[in-house]
Amino acid sequence: MPRTTLEISAKKELYRRFRKLSERNAVRVLGYIDALEEERPNEETVAALEEGERMLKDPDALRFSTVEDLLTELRS
C-alpha cells in the first residue's frame, strides 16, 4: 500500500476513534494536541538566537572556557 494511502487510512481511523469519545475526553485530547504543538518564539527571542548563530560563526568573537573566565572579563 502506498504511503499516502496508509496516511489517509490512519487519519480516518483517528477521526473515527475521536468521534466516539465523550465530550470531556475529546476536550482532554484536544488539550494534549495543543500542548504538543510547537511554540513560536517571539521576535526578540528569534533575534537573540540569530545573533548567537552569527557569534558562533565569527572566528574573532570572544570565547570563554569557564564561567570564571567570563565573569573576570565582565568585571574588567
Image (tube, rainbow, N blue to C red):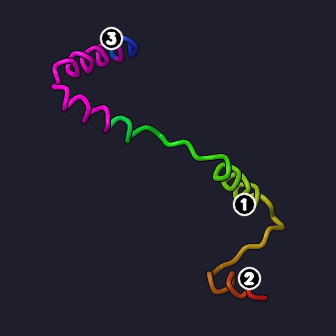
Q: Secondary structure at mark 3?
A: loop
Report the residue marked by disc 1: 56
Q: Secondary structure at mark 1?
A: helix
Who's the residue at 37% across and 41% down the image?
Answer: 35
Which residue is found at the position 58% from the left and 46% from the top? 41
> Is 24 in front, or is 45?
24
Front label number (3 vs 2):
2
Q: CA distance from mark 1 to mark 2?
A: 19 Å
| Image quarter (top left, top right, bottom left or bottom right) of the C terminus | bottom right
Identify the disc placed on residue 1.
3
Q: Amino acid at mark 1?
A: Leu
Badge 3 or badge 1: first in the primary sequence: 3
Judging by the rendered image, the residue that carries numbered circle 2 is: 74
Q: Earlier in the sequence, mark 3 or mark 2?
A: 3
**Of discs 1 and 2, which sits in the foreground?**
2
* Main SS category, magenta section: helix
Q: Please, what is the three-letter code of the amino acid marked with disc 2?
A: Leu
